[in-house]
């Protein structure tokens, strides 16, 4: 499959993730680890259904290694714990924009990779800085709005930043395991659900959803942004253009923020709209090569861990 086609598959995840913030807010009230356990169990069900229907896919799992499982579980478990935690402590629109620093970080972290994928050009750095300014504007707007207690907001913003760092590092590191099939995400989701459920039993009190809206939000989380999205993103990160995936993902905060506002879960202000536009403009600039048709057409060779 060509580099461009693999990148397009990865971009499906960006569309699915645009609903993540809205569904997380609608499911609010369920503790973070419990929410992880429930939604990742559904994500594992998607992969299990595929493995049962495709015997060849089961044979491919022989290429799965211990380090790949550790990376997958650490990435999924760590990111979503910080993500769900952030929404419990800070205004959703600001948290959402800060979380979307992960595409910027993917573009920058890709410089650590050897070969063509590791070359950063002026437009990647300029677009990253523009998007970073947008995220800073969102934080300042959140502080001025007084929508959350100061200490709580700081915790929420810190958790959102930790989520961004975790997901960017995971996405880039998956390139080291390009030979591992994307069906292995089934194992990652299952182990993540088990680990989150164990952690929940140790440190959290169980709070079951009280409304049909909460149950529906959790179901959609598990099937979409915490389900199918991981399978297509894994494939795109391993075989597509990481810089383009990271840059194009900047469109997600605009879609995600618009969805929050549409559902009445956040209030639009001129400053926040400017922040969202700055992040999106950074995406356009950083992905200039793709927009001008300069992306490569051949899939990159797998990178062996050393």
Image: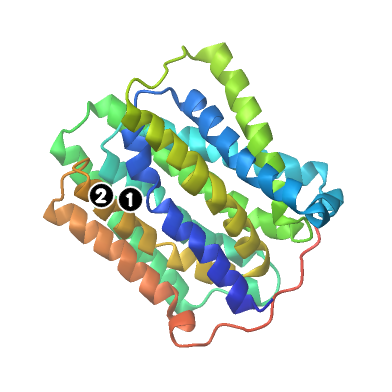
Question: Which residue does the image show at 42% across and 59% down from the upper left?
Answer: 15
Residue 226, given in percent of the width and then of the height, sits at 51, 43
**Residue 286 shows in this picture:** yes
Q: Residues within 10 Å of mark 1 (few under 14, many from 20)?
A: many
Q: Is residue 64 above or below residue 7?
A: above
Residues at discs 1 and 2 in contact (Cβ within 8 Å): yes
Q: Residue at x 50, y 33 (%)?
A: 81
Query: What is the quadrant of the N terminus in the image?
Result: bottom right
* Left or right: 142, with 240 as reference point: left
Q: Residues within 10 Å of mark 2 (few under 14, many from 20)?
A: many
Residue at the spot of label 1: 97
- What colour scheme has been applied to the protein in the rendered image? rainbow
Left of 281 or right of it: where is 35?
A: right
Q: Label for residue 138?
A: 2
Name the front one of labels 1 and 2.
1
Quarter location, residue 131: bottom left
List x then y, in percent, for residue 199.
58, 20
The residue positioned 65% from the left and 26% from the top of the image is 194
């Amino acid at each position: 499959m060509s580099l461009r086609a693999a990148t397009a598959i990865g971009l499906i995840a960006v569309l699915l993730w645009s609903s993540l913030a809205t569904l997380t807010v609608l499911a609010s009230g369920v503790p973070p680890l419990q929410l992880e356990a429930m939604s990742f169990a559904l994500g594992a069900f998607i992969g299990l259904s595929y493995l049962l229907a495709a015997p060849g896919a089961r044979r491919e799992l022989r290429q799965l290694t211990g380090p790949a499982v550790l990376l997958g579980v650490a990435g999924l478990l760590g990111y979503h714990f910080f993500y769900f935690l952030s929404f419990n402590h800070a205004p959703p629109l600001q948290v959402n924009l800060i979380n979307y620093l992960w595409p910027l970080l993917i573009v920058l972290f890709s410089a650590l990779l050897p070969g063509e994928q590791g070359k950063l050009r002026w437009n990647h750095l300029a677009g990253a800085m523009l998007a970073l300014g947008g995220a800073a504007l969102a934080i300042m707007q959140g502080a001025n709005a007084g929508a959350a207690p100061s200490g709580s907001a700081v915790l929420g913003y810190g958790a959102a930043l930790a989520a961004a760092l975790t997901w960017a590092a995971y996405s880039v590191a998956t390139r080291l395991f390009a030979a591992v099939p994307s069906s292995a995400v089934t194992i990652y989701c299952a182990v993540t659900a088990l680990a989150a459920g164990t952690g929940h039993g140790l440190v959290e009190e169980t709070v079951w959803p009280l409304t049909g809206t909460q149950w529906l939000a959790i179901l959609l989380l598990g099937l979409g942004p915490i389900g199918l999205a991981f399978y297509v993103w894994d494939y795109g990160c391993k075989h597509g253009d990481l810089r383009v995936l990271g840059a194009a993902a900047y469109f997600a905060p605009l879609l995600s923020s618009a969805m929050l506002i549409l559902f009445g879960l956040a209030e639009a202000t001129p400053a926040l709209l400017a922040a969202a536009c700055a992040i999106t403009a950074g995406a356009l600039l950083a992905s200039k090569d793709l927009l001008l048709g300069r992306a490569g057409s051949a899939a990159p060779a797998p990178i062996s861990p050393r």
